[in-house]
Amino acid sequence: MTDEAFVKDKDIVVPGDKIASGMGFLPGKGTYRSDSDIFAERVGLVHIDGNVIKLVPLSGAYMPKVNDRVIGKIIDVLMSGWRIDFGSPYSAVLSMKEATSEFIPKGADLTRYFAIDDFIVCKIINVTSQRLVDVSMMGPGLRKLKGGRFVNVNTNKVPRIIGKEGSMVSMIKQATGCNIIIGQNGMVWIDGEPENEVIAVEAIKLVEAEAHKSGLTDRVSKFLEEKTGKKVEAVQNFKKR
């Protein structure tokens, strides 16, 4: 039997779609084999890597992973720390020792440091088999967020919004003059002039909506130029700092 692929790289498929036929192809994540055929088991973006075919999911809740940087909201003040909601099925705990290098005396009013509804950038440092999550504020860039606005995006689109070596988000920052922090959990913080914040949100939503399409960089660049009225540098000119 001749090996044959019925889809192209970056095509979108739904559960039950036949992706390929022949034993020369290997089923990867999100696919399964039935006899000599490979089918999609969920909605996803096709990624063909050599002879391995896998799917990149287009939806789904964020599942916490150690070392991920996330943006979360304080939802409870505990006896020895804070509980954080970061858009996962599981909440996280920020302990006093992981919150600050400052000594916090026993019985101190913890709302002096973080109050309910405060937003923070933190790092996941532990995820147990029972999905208990611990986070830390000890590290560069980890802090309380003040002002600005927030936008939620599909967690599976975060890598595309960041771009290769940070190229896409760097282009949006350069064009709008906004400070932008993207959490791996799909929460994005944008801080700048109000009209530029709106442009940045629209650009990020454009990337999210068209992440699976080719030529996206050019479309985002053109969009930013039209909205800001200034030349936007080509993405490939950005290097990771």
Image (spheres, rainbow, N blue to C red):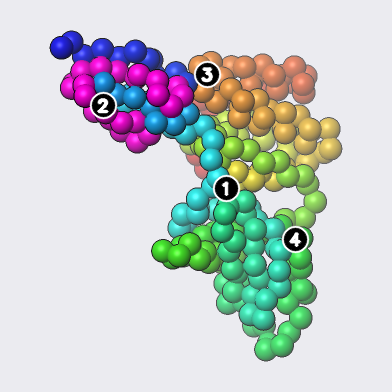
Q: Residue at x 70, y 63 (%)?
A: 74
Q: Which of labels 3 and 2 is toward the front? A: 2
Q: Earlier in the sequence, mark 4 or mark 3?
A: 4
The location of residue 2, given as percent across then percent down, is 18, 10
Q: Nearer the viewer, residue 25 or 166?
A: 25
Q: Which of labels 2 and 4 is toward the front? A: 2
Of all residues shown, which one is farthest toward the left?
1
Q: Amino acid at mark 4?
A: Asp
SS of the residue under disc 1: loop
Q: Earlier in the sequence, mark 3 or mark 2?
A: 2
Range of magenta residues: 13-36
Using the numbered discs, state the Cα–Cα distance from disc 2 to disc 1 in whole angstroms.
34 Å
Q: Nearer the viewer, residue 187 or 38?
A: 38
Q: Which mark is residue 118?
A: 4
Q: Residue at x 84, y 37 (%)?
A: 194
Q: Is residue 115 above or below residue 164?
A: below
Q: Is residue 138 left or right of residue 49?
A: right
Total number of numbered labels?
4
Mark 2, residue position: 34
Q: Is residue 122 visible?
A: yes
Q: Amino acid at mark 3?
A: Lys
Q: Amino acid at mark 1?
A: Asn
Neighbours of disc 2 within 10 Å: few (<14), some (14-19), many (20+): few
Q: Is residue 40 left or right of residue 216?
A: left
Q: Is residue 127 above or below residue 21?
A: below
**Contact between labelled residues 2 and 3, with CB atoms less than 8 Å apart:** no
